[in-house]
C-alpha cells in the first residue's frame, strides 16, 4: 500500500471519528435540553384528569374546609372513590355507589382506626375499629342504623358480646380476665334482671334481680 493510500485511509478514519463525536455531542445536548425542559416542581390548586373523550375521571384539589382530596369518577361523572386528609391530619378513604352514597369508609381520627359499611340509604350497618389503647370492637346495626350486636375486647383482655333490640342491649356474655364466664339478661330499661355465672371454684350461680337491679334470689 502506498503512502498516499495510507494517508487517505487515515483521513477517512479521522473524519468518521469527528462525525461520531459531533453526533454524540448532539445527542448529549439534546438529552440535556430535554432534561432541562422537564419541570421538577409543579404548583397548582387543582389538577383535573380526563379520559380520551375529555370526560373528567379524577380531580386532585383542596376543599374549602381544608381537606386535601383525590376524587375518582366513572365515565358518567359519578364519584366512585375518594381519598382525603383533613386539615387536622386525619386521613380517610371512601368507596361510593353509583347513586353517590358512601358504602365503605376507612378512616383514622384521634388515634382511633375505623372501618364502616353502609346500606344503600347511607346508614351504617357494620363497623370495626380499634381505640388508641388497642381495644378492638365490632358493631352490627340494623337497616335503621340502630346498634343490635357488638363484640369487643377490653384493655384487660376481657371479651364481651352484647345483643340488643331496637331500644338497647338485652343480653350480655363475657369472660373475665380470670377466665370466669358470665351471662346477663337485661330489661327494656337497661337494668340487669338475671345473671348466670361460673365461680372460681367451678360452681355455677343463677341470680335474679328486681326492676331496680337489686338481687332478690340466688341459687347455686
Image (tube, rainbow, N blue to C red):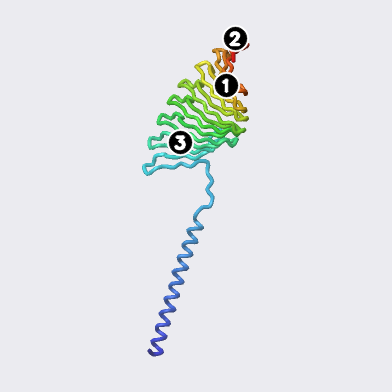
Coordinates of residue 57 in the picture (x, y in percent): 42, 39
Q: Nearer the viewer, mark 1 or mark 2?
A: 1
Q: Residue at x 58, y 25 (%)?
A: 175
Label 1 secondary element: strand
Q: Disc 1 designates what residue?
A: 182
Label 3 secondary element: strand
Looking at marks 3 and 2 on the same chain, the residue that comes earlier in the sequence is marked by 3
Question: Residue 193 — which label?
Answer: none
Look at the image and tell me in which quarter the C terminus lies.
top right
Q: Residue at x 48, y 64 (%)?
A: 29
Give the Cα distance between marks 3 and 2. Answer: 52 Å
In the depicted view, which residue is nearer to us: 159 or 72?
Answer: 159
Residue 43 position (above or below residue 131): below
Give the Cα distance between marks 1 and 2. Answer: 19 Å
Question: Residue 210 — which label?
Answer: 2
Looking at marks 1 and 3 on the same chain, the residue that comes earlier in the sequence is marked by 3
Question: Residue 81 — which label?
Answer: 3
Looking at the rendering, which quadrant does residue 173 occupy?
top right
Q: Nearer the viewer, mark 1 or mark 3?
A: 1
Look at the image and tell me in which quarter the N terminus lies.
bottom left
Q: Residue at x 51, y 32 (%)?
A: 115
Q: Nearer the viewer, mark 3 or mark 2?
A: 2
Label 2 secondary element: loop
Coordinates of residue 82 in the picture (x, y in percent): 48, 36
Amino acid at each position: 500500500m502506498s503512502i498516499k493510500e495510507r494517508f487517505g485511509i487515515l483521513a477517512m478514519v479521522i473524519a468518521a471519528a469527528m462525525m461520531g463525536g459531533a453526533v454524540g455531542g448532539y445527542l448529549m445536548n439534546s438529552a440535556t435540553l430535554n432534561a432541562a425542559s422537564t419541570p421538577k416542581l409543579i404548583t397548582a390548586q387543582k389538577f383535573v384528569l380526563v379520559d380520551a373523550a375529555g370526560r373528567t375521571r379524577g380531580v386532585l384539589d383542596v376543599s374549602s374546609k381544608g381537606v386535601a382530596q383525590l376524587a375518582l369518577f366513572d365515565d358518567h361523572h359519578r364519584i366512585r372513590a375518594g381519598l382525603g386528609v383533613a386539615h387536622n391530619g386525619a386521613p380517610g378513604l371512601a368507596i361510593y355507589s353509583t347513586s353517590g352514597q358512601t358504602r365503605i369508609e376507612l378512616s383514622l381520627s384521634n388515634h382511633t382506626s375505623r372501618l364502616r359499611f353502609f346500606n344503600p340509604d347511607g346508614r351504617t350497618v357494620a363497623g370495626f375499629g380499634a381505640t388508641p389503647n388497642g381495644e378492638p370492637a365490632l358493631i352490627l346495626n340494623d337497616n335503621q342504623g340502630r346498634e343490635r350486636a357488638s363484640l369487643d375486647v377490653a384493655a384487660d383482655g376481657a371479651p364481651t358480646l352484647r345483643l340488643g333490640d331496637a331500644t338497647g342491649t338485652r343480653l350480655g356474655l363475657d369472660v373475665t380476665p380470670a377466665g370466669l364466664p358470665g351471662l346477663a339478661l337485661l330489661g327494656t330499661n337497661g337494668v340487669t334482671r338475671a345473671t348466670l355465672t361460673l365461680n372460681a371454684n367451678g360452681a355455677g350461680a343463677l341470680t335474679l334481680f328486681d326492676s331496680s337491679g337489686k338481687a332478690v334470689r340466688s341459687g347455686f
